[in-house]
Structure formats: C-alpha cells, structure tokens
Image: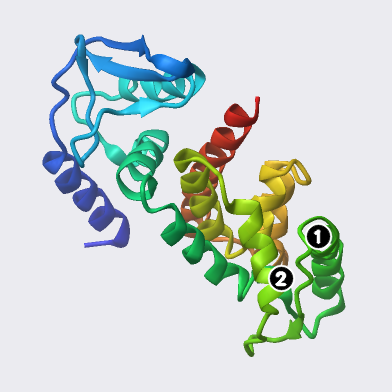
Amino acid sequence: MTSTSKSAALGVSRAANLPTRFYKDVTIKDEEGGAASLLLDGKPVRTPGKSHLIFPTRALAEAAADEWRAQQERIDPSTMPLTKLANSAIDGVRGHEQTVIDDILKYAGSDLLCYRAEGPKALVASQTKHWDPVLSWAKATLDAPLNLAEGVVHVAQPKASLDGVRHALEGLDAFSLAAMHVMTTLTGSALLPTAVLRGRLTPEQAWQAAHVDEDFQISQWGEDAEAAHRRAHRRRDFDVAARVFETLRA
C-alpha cells in the first residue's frame, strides 16, 4: 500500500470514529456583560468539563457558531480551532491562570529570539531584521532585557527580565491567556505573542518572525507537501488565537 493510500485509509477510519452531527440549528444567546453563548437546537453547548460554552464577546461566539454550522455528517473537532481554544480557556485556564503564566514564562526563559545562528550570513541577517526590534521593544517597554546566545546551548535569563514578562501577562482573562499559550507554543516564543497582544507586531509580522529559520531552509531546499500541510494547520490555530486578542482589545 502506498503512503497516499495509507493516508486515505486512515482518513476514512478516523471519519468513521467521529461523532454524528446531532443538531440542525446553531444560534447565539446574549449573556451578561456582553458575553454570548452557543445554542444547538435551542440547547446550550457545554465544554468537555461540563461548563457552559460562553464567549466573552458576541463576535467570538459568531465565529465559533460558524465552525459548528460548517460541520457535515460528522463533527470533526480538528476543524473547530476557536471552539477548542474556548474549551481550553474555560476548563483549563480559568482558575489556573498563574499555572498557565508559569508555563508561558518557561518559553521566555529559552525564547526563540535569543538563539542565533552563526551562519550563513543571509540567515543571520534575517534573524537580526525580524528579532532585534522585538528584543529592543521588550527591553524598553517590558523592562525585560534578554541574553543572546549562538547555537542551541542554553543561556540563562535574568529573573528581573522574566518578572517583566510576567507582569505583562498578569491580569489577562482566561481567553487571552489561552490564546497567548497557543501562540507561544506554536512559535517557541513568549515575546512574539506578547508583542501582538500589546500591538507592537501584527499577527503576520509575528508569524514571519517565528519562521525565519524555517523559511530560510525552504528557500534553500524547498518545502514538501506534508510539511506545508502541517504549517497551514499551525497557521490556522495561530490566526484564531490572534483573533481572540484583536476581538478582546476592540
């Protein structure tokens, strides 16, 4: 069996295990404080933890409703990134904000932007172009100067600098922290999503900065279809998280 036929067979098997769509209508109910919840055939949607699926803004609820409306005969959670993020925010982040912040700070302690290539010159120049302005911004705005290193050998970061990043995250609501965590894990950087949160970078600029190394390799060797497919899925999740930031800032 070829790799293509194997993938097709796995896809059919996976689809057969997905739950059948059990609803017809998806509507939105306004909640207190500008929040909104989803209703399936008039019944509230619940998270895996059995909490009501309530979004902090109607705009986010509308976007999630579109995910539910787009489901066909089977419900495929992999095509519902905003719903997944909301479930994480409600079940996993709310009430555990400090734990999530601590996890994000682990990335700040070994932030992507701090590890520089020794060469080639084109890669070094691209890293400098995309990363140095963010590091300068973090130093000036967050009071968080970070140490740099060449290669992959770990370099310790000052506690005071990590405290500066922590201060930027404290007080964020569960949805913003969930979005921050998604973007951090996708980029390997805590500074890039923080810069998006603060309006220093656009989501597109942050995505480009996170993929300087990968894009350089693609420019040298090309990109295979499977890698491109994985990257597209990561980009979709990244954009959904960025949309949460933008909606909550509006």
Q: Is residue 219 left or right of residue 66?
A: right
Within-10-Å neighbours for mark 1: few <14, some 14–19, many 20+: some
Location of residue 31 (image quadrant) = top left
Question: Element at badge 1?
Answer: helix
Q: Quadrant of the N terminus?
A: bottom left
- Residue 160 falls in image quadrant: bottom right
Measured from the top left, where is residue 208 in percent x and y?
A: 71, 53
The colour scheme of the drawn protein is: rainbow
The answer to whether residue 67 of the structure is visible from this angle is yes
Q: CA distance from mark 1 to mark 2?
A: 20 Å
Q: Are marks 1 and 2 in contact (CB under 8 Å)?
A: no
237 horizontally vs 142: left or right: left
Residue at image location 58% in from the left, 30% down from the top: 248
Number of disc labels: 2
Q: Which mark is residue 130?
A: 1
Relative horizontal placement of residue 31, taking residue 105 as reference (left or right): left
Q: Amino acid at mark 1?
A: His
Asked if residue 217 shows in the view, the reply is: no
Please say if 48 is above or below 150. above
- Could you tell which of marks 1 and 2 lies nearer the N-terminus? 1
- The residue under label 2 is 161
**Which kind of residue does numbered mark 2 sit on?**
Ser
Residue at image x 72%, y 44%? Answer: 198
Question: Camera-side residue: 166 or 119?
Answer: 166
111 shown above or below 97: below
* 171 lies above or below 46: below
Residue at x-position 50% and y-position 59%: 101
> Badge 2, how many Cα within 10 Å: few under 14, some, many 20+?
many
Residue at 34%, 22% (x, y): give it.
Answer: 70
Q: Secondary structure at mark 2?
A: helix
Q: Name the quadrant containing residue 39.
A: top left
Q: Nearer the viewer, mark 1 or mark 2?
A: 2
